[in-house]
Image (tube, rainbow, N blue to C red):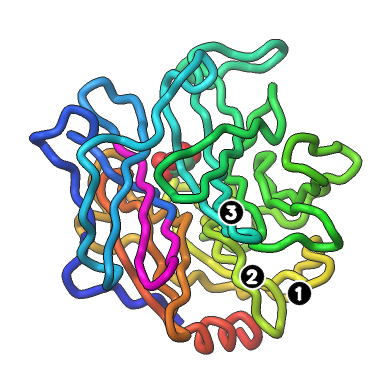
């Protein structure tokens, strides 16, 4: 089972006439709300700082962008960029998870190879354009690829996050406090399965189905090739992985997936369901946005039977 690429990909390209989305537009979050698709995408321009642009569409294919970014860095902890958003709608409020890429290592934190830091953050909005920062999931560690489940489970907000090389689960009463006692690893790389042998991280918002939460995740191998796979998590206790097929569902093949700013990357933070069709938006080679789809029933059958 593989996702099918949309015929006129990519669906979003950098804009060489712009200062802030000159070089790369990639790794978007997408929400379908009141019949329209709303995309928040990561854009890099002349200063190489990531900001989030906003675009909307009625068909999910042709997007009209705002002239200016809607979410930009504001302090030392996100000065190098707002990265890799995912958006979950919970009780009428849109919650965004994003990675803040900062200028300085936090206390006790080993700097990234470029000397900065990453912080997994939350923000909220009621209109998808105006965002208010809530706070971090954790500080002072290498942690990103966090995404909120689209409803509370057992009365708590629940998110997946990544403590390398594993995907973890965390719970919170209020999105502000994320007690360590409520965090646990749920799945990691499979050393005997080449495509997801090195590192794994969550994709878009988990999809609720009668058989469990369907999660699309990314993984890379020894050669740093990013692919997408799926797993099924228990509905009431998503720390339990019910199924995890050995095969991937998507890999870089097109020239714009194989070459770009970072080669051989398909990275998704958006899986929107419209009429039983899953629209998977993904960053390709950290350079453009692509769209690939599958019928939800087919993905589920693959998850259950492969
Ligand atoms: C990951 C993230 C993504 C990126 C990917 C491939 O660590 O930072 O933003 O798409 O690497 O470069």
Disc number for residue 93: 3
Can you say whether 134 is above or below 40 in the image? above
Disc number for residue 231: 2
Residue 306 image offset from top left, x and y in percent: 60, 84
Q: Which residue is mark 1?
A: 242
The residue lying at 47 percent from left, 85 percent from top is 276
Q: Quadrant of ligand 1?
A: top left
Taking depth in this image into account, of 193 and 265 the one nearest to the observer is: 265
The residue lying at 25 percent from left, 35 percent from top is 68
Relative placement, left or right, of 277 versus 255 is: right
Relative placement, left or right, of 28 versus 65 is: right
Quadrant of the image occupied by residue 196: bottom right
Taking depth in this image into account, of 99 and 93 the one nearest to the observer is: 93
Relative placement, left or right, of 244 versus 20 is: right
Tell me which secondary structure the magenta stretch mostly adopts: strand
Q: Earlier in the sequence, mark 2 or mark 1?
A: 2
Q: Which residues are magenta?
A: 30-43
The residue lying at 32 percent from left, 47 percent from top is 54
Q: Contact (CB < 8 A) between labels 2 and 1?
A: yes
* Crowding near the residue tagged with mark 1, few <14, some 14–19, many ≥20 C-alpha atoms within 10 Å: some
Residue 4 image offset from top left, x and y in percent: 33, 77
Q: Earlier in the sequence, mark 3 or mark 2?
A: 3
């Amino acid at each position: 089972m593989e996702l099918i690429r949309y015929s006129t990909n990519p669906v979003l390209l950098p804009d060489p006439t712009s200062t802030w989305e000159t070089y790369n537009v990639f790794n978007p979050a997408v929400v379908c709300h009141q019949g329209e698709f709303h995309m928040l995408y990561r854009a890099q321009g002349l200063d190489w700082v990531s900001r989030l642009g906003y675009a909307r569409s009625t068909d999910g294919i042709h997007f009209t962008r705002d002239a200016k970014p809607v979410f930009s860095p504001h302090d030392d902890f996100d000065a190098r960029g707002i990265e890799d958003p995912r958006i979950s709608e919970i009780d009428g409020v849109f919650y965004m998870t994003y990675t803040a890429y900062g200028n300085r290592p936090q206390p006790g934190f080993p700097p990234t190879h470029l000397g900065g830091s990453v912080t997994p953050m939350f923000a909220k909005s009621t209109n998808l354009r105006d965002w208010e920062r809530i706070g971090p999931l954790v500080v002072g560690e290498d942690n990103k690829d966090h995404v909120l489940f689209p409803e509370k489970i057992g009365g708590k907000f629940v998110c997946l996050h990544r403590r390398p090389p594993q995907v973890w689960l965390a719970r919170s009463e209020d999105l502000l406090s994320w007690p360590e006692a409520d965090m646990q690893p749920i799945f990691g790389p499979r050393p005997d399965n080449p495509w997801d042998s090195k590192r794994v991280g969550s994709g878009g918002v988990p999809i609720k189905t009668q058989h469990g939460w369907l999660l699309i995740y990314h993984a890379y191998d020894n050669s740093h090739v990013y692919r997408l796979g799926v797993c099924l998590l228990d509905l009431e206790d998503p720390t339990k992985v019910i199924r995890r097929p050995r095969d991937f569902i998507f890999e870089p093949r097109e020239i714009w997936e194989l070459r770009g700013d970072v080669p051989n990357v398909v990275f998704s933070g958006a899986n929107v369901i419209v009429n039983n069709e899953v629209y998977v938006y993904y960053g390709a080679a950290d350079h453009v946005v692509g769209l690939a789809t599958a019928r939800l029933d087919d993905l589920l059958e693959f998850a259950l039977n492969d």
